[in-house]
Image (tube, rainbow, N blue to C red):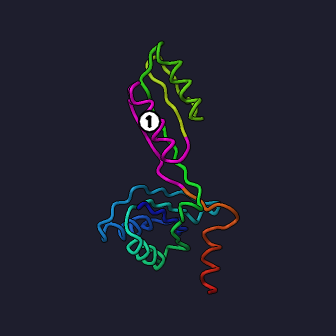
Amino acid sequence: MEHIISALVENRAGTLSRIAGLFSRRAFNIDSLTVGETADPTISRMTIAVTGDDDTIEQIVKQIAKLVDVRAVRELEAAHCMRREILLVKIAVDEQSRPAIIALAGVFRSRIIDVSLSAMTIEATGNREKLEGLLLILKPYGIMELARTGLIALERGEQTLESHLHHEDQT
């Protein structure tokens, strides 16, 4: 089962390698790891997607929480969070295929961000299923190149990662 771990960490050298090291020591493959600065430039948000059993993930979350650079960490429940990825895909085109690819980009609410005589680059944002669907439809046209950001996620509603932890500390 895929689990989503969200962590707020100090934005400094070595933090990423220490957290990734926890997974490698347990021989876990990280499916997706995304790190980016938050509204506070001294803090970064890490979103880690990993497949594993509940007990092991719970232990990893507890170990991450003990690291000095970690401000907050929590497993996000899939049903209560918004998940997105960004995909850039370069497709081989010719005069006959160009209109169909433009139409497909529209159906998937994606944008064409670069066009040349023999290639077109599409930017798509959405959940993994939507992006996999787009790639499946585009594959017959010839995928020349592909880049994905990895998963990012936030909880729905007014809850924040830090607000959960402050509440848990009080109980």
- Residue at (55% x, 68% y) in the render: 8
Camera-side residue of 41 and 104: 104
- Is residue 166 placed above or below 121 in the rendered structure? below
- Residue at (40% x, 30% y) in the render: 139
Quadrant showing the C terminus: bottom right
> Where's residue 123, x and y in %?
53, 36
**From which residue to which does the magenta span run?**
125-152
Q: Dot 1: what SS?
A: helix
Q: Which residue is mark 1?
A: 135
- Residue at (44% x, 57% y) in the render: 33
Camera-side residue of 8 and 101: 101
Instruction: In the displayed orientation, state which residue is furthest to the top.
Output: 95
> Where's residue 53, x and y in %?
38, 69
Query: In the picture, residue 1 is in which quadrant?
Result: bottom left
> Where's residue 159, x and y in %?
66, 67
What's under tag 1, amino acid-wise? Leu
142 left or right, relative to 99: left
Give the class, few, some or many, for how many residues have Cα within 10 Å of label 1's Cα (few <14, many ≥20): some
Camera-side residue of 71 and 47: 47
Report if residue 142 lies within the magenta region. Answer: yes
Query: In the picture, residue 16 is in which quadrant?
Result: bottom left
> Where's residue 130, x and y in %?
51, 42
